[in-house]
């Protein structure tokens, strides 16, 4: 029991006992007093009154005896009666005297009594003598009556005294009874108050006791093992859950200590040494994972150990961590792990590389075979990459592969001995992909592009290293042939400039910074302008005029080319139609198509729409495509080209000779014109090889019934050579640089009158 509470309870007991004793003493005293009063009242007051009354009766009785004697003069009878009455008077008188000893009235009564007795003697003398003196006898009788009256009056006074005394005592007794009543009432009230106070505290104590009991049951009812241990690791108490846990794990074959970690006494000693009260233990026992909270109870020199089987939770945590750090498709560690591992690798202070590895053309494959196969393919790629890394473990034994995103994998190459190591590993990887990856019996030939950055030389922060590797990867992709590129700060600067330019380009169209210039295409036989090539220019607000070679690739990459290309087509067609409507000689308008425009499903539809809108006849429009665009997927290209041809427009193969297209391939394409690339024209006067090539290209074109046009003609010599090959048309600075629409209209106008090139001012 709680000590404080015990003291309080004892204090209440003591108070109750003291109060009880006090009140009892008081009540005893009061009742004794009352008893005394009542006893004196009953034992003294009442007998005294009786004695007085008896005395009075005896005194009064004398008179009839005397008168009877006077009447009868029977002396003998008189004397007998008188004596017996006198005896009664003496008896009662003695009692009264006892009660009222020393009372003055007694003396008076005694005097008068004596008179009466003396008078009776005289009367007896008088009545016994003869003759009888009747007058004296009567006088004696009267005298005696007077004395009797006096005695009676005095006896009445005494009786009144007694009455007064009795009343006083009765009042006193009543007061005592009232006092006792008050005391009892006060005592009862105090007891009630004390009972209430004691009840209140008792209630608090009982609630506390209930709580303590509940807590005491905590260990017993705890579903987890709870143990009380000595310093030596001896089990002094084990709750029922300890036994049931052990029984479930070992069918009761092992002792309870099997649930505790090895070296429990040492661990307990360690806990004491730390000076702390609590320790947390994590350990494995009986094949399960446990966490124990151990409390040192200093005052008892004992330990309470609360055991918790955390096997399921730990497994769930491991599963969750695995999921958080792994890619579910390939089961490779994911991007998050990549970043964290790079951080740790950099922190190790060793040299290493971070690489991003992109599977080329996977996007196209996904479009073709669907996601399910593509997923299997990615799994196959992951396996192939892991295999390659295992095979080339001599180059970097700790190389780790990650799935970064989509078709991009991450590669961490720690502890490299040289800057060339990543490139060597890359070569191994590329070699690994020479054999196709098989999915569902289908063979996929894949290429890889890899960009890498080195730590600590390129950067020391994981995300920066990844971003550098990505820049390098973009460089590789930009080259379009796969392979490897290490991060180079200069490339990075270039890349950020490109980014800036790309941003500017986004607004170029709406801000009317783009415009077209036109370069004439001249028929060699007549030297008349038969066509114009629309060439795009960008008037950049701060950089001046930017050539399409610089920004068309940007527009391609960002997708802006779709909008820009549509604008070019529409503007060029509208311009050509305007010239026609102005009555200028009809010419063909050549418009360059970009790779992305070319692969668009809506191309033919868009062209038809522009033609309708502008009113330009289809045969007045020529679309330039390059070998490279059409070579990727020949069947598809043929389909697109045919759709365009069906509209009635002309198609010319731009930059011909740079794409190594085969004759067999060329033959299948529905085209009208070959445009010999200016790189061949440039040197044909000095380089016999180029001259031969140009001649062969012209012949090839003719053999396929195609018109041949040569671009980049700058000199009369080149012009003459081309004329000699039978080339039909030429385009180049020799005739004119690309010019704006007004100048071009001027040239057309002049050409309508005479041959402008005989005295051209546009060279
Ligand atoms: P391209 O289609 O082969 O255009 C011919 C390029 O050669 C033009 O350069 C033209 O100015 C230049 N050129 C013409 N004659 C001579 C000459 O005698 N000597 C020299 N050295 N160069 C000459 P430009 O305008 O800079 O265009 C470069 C490329 O940009 C074009 O090559 C074309 O592939 C692309 N391009 C231009 N405009 C557009 C366009 O509107 N859309 C698309 N998709 N591409 C365009
Ligand atoms: Mg062109
Ligand atoms: Mg060209």
Image (cartoon, helix red, strand yellow):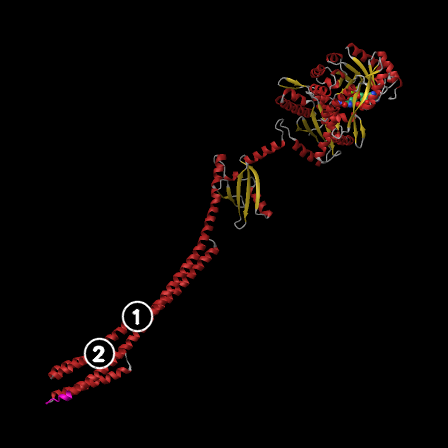
- Residue that label 2 marks: 56
Q: Quadrant of ligand 1?
A: top right
- Residue that label 1 marks: 38
The magenta region covers 130-137
Q: Nearer the viewer, residue 377 or 748?
A: 748
Q: Farthest residue in the right direction?
A: 759
Some atom of ligand 1 lies within 8 Å of the CB belonging to the residue at label 2: no
Give the image quarter of residue 381.
top right
512 vs 233, left or right, is right
Residue at image coords 64%, 17%: 442
Give the image quarter of residue 754.
top right
Instruction: Look at the picture and state if 194 lies above or below 687.
Output: below
Q: Position of residue 128 (x, y in %)?
A: 12, 87
Q: Position of residue 182 (x, y in %)?
A: 37, 65
Gap between marks 1 and 2, in whole Å? 26 Å
Q: Position of residue 189 (x, y in %)?
A: 40, 61
């Amino acid at each position: 029991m709680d000590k404080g509470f015990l003291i309080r309870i004892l204090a209440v007991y003591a108070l109750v006992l003291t109060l009880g004793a006090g009140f009892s003493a008081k009540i005893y005293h009061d009742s004794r007093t009352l008893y005394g009063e009542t006893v004196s009242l009953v034992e003294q007051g009442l007998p005294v009154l009786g004695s007085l009354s008896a005395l009075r009766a005896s005194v009064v009785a004398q008179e009839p005896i005397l008168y009877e004697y006077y009447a009868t003069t029977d002396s003998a009878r008189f004397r007998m009666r008188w004596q017996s009455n006198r005896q009664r008077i003496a008896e009662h008188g003695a009692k009264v005297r006892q009660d009222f000893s020393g009372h003055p009235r007694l003396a008076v009564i005694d005097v008068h009594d004596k008179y009466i007795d003396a008078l009776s003697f005289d009367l007896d003398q008088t009545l016994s003598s003869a003759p009888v003196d009747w007058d004296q006898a009567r006088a004696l009788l009267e005298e005696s009556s007077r004395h009797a009256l006096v005695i009676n009056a005095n006896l009445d006074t005494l009786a009144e005294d007694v009455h007064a005394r009795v009343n006083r005592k009765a009042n006193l007794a009543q007061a005592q009874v009232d006092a006792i009543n008050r005391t009892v009432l006060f005592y009862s009230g105090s007891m009630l108050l004390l009972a209430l106070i004691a009840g209140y505290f008792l209630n608090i104590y009982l609630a506390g006791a209930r709580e303590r009991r509940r807590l005491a049951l905590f260990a017993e009812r705890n579903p987890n093992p709870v143990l009380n241990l000595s310093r030596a690791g001896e089990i002094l108490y084990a709750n029922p859950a300890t036994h049931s846990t052990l029984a479930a794990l070992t069918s009761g074959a092992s002792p309870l200590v099997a649930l505790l970690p090895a070296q429990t006494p040492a661990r307990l000693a360690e806990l004491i040494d730390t000076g702390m009260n609590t320790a947390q233990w994590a350990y494995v026992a009986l094949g399960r994972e446990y966490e124990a909270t151990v409390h040192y109870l200093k005052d008892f020199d004992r330990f309470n150990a609360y055991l918790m089987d955390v096997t399921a939770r730990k497994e769930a945590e491991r599963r969750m961590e695995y999921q958080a750090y792994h890619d579910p498709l390939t089961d490779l560690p994911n991007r998050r792990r990549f970043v964290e591992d790079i951080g740790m690798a950099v922190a190790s202070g060793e040299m290493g590389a971070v690489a991003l590895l992109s599977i080329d053309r996977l996007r196209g494959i996904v479009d073709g075979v669907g996601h399910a196969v593509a997923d299997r393919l990615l799994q196959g790629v992951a396996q192939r990459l892991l295999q390659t890394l295992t095979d080339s473990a001599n180059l970097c034994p700790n190389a780790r592969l990650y799935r970064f995103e989509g078709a991009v994998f991450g590669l961490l190459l720690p502890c490299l001995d040289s800057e060339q190591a990543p490139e060597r590993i890359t070569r191994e990887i590329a070699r690994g992909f020479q054999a196709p990856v098989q999915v569902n019996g289908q063979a996929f030939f894949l290429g890889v592009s890899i960009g890498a950055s080195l730590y600590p030389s390129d950067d020391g922060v994981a995300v920066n290293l990844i971003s550098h590797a990505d820049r390098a990867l973009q460089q590789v992709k930009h080259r379009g042939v796969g392979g490897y590129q290490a991060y180079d700060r200069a490339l990075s600067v270039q890349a950020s400039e490109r980014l800036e330019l790309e941003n500017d380009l986004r607004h170029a169209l709406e801000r009317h910074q783009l415009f077209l210039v036109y370069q004439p295409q001249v028929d060699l036989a007549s030297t008349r302008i038969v066509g114009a090539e629309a060439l795009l220019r960008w008037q950049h607000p701060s950089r001046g005029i930017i050539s399409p070679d610089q920004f068309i690739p940007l527009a391609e990459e960002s997708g802006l080319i779709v909008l820009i290309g549509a604008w070019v087509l529409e503007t060029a067609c509208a311009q050509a139609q305007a010239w026609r409507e102005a009555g200028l000689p009809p010419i063909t308008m050549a418009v360059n198509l970009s790779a992305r425009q070319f692969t668009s499903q809506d191309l033919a539809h868009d062209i038809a729409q522009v033609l309708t809108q502008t009113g330009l006849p289809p045969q007045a429009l020529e679309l330039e495509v390059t070998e490279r665009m059409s070579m990727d997927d020949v069947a598809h290209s043929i389909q697109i080209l045919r759709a365009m041809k069906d509209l009635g427009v002309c198609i010319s193969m731009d930059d011909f000779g740079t794409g190594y297209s085969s004759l067999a391939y060329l033959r299948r394409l529905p085209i009208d014109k070959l445009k010999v690339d200016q790189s061949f024209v440039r040197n044909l006067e000095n380089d016999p090889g180029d001259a031969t090539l140009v001649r062969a290209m012209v012949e090839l074109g003719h053999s396929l019934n195609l018109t041949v046009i040569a671009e980049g003609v700058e000199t009369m010599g080149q012009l003459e050579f081309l004329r000699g090959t039978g080339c039909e048309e030429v385009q180049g600075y020799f005739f004119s640089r690309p010019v704006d629409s007004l100048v071009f209209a001027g040239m057309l106008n002049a050409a309508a009158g005479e041959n402008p090139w005989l005295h051209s001012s546009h060279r």
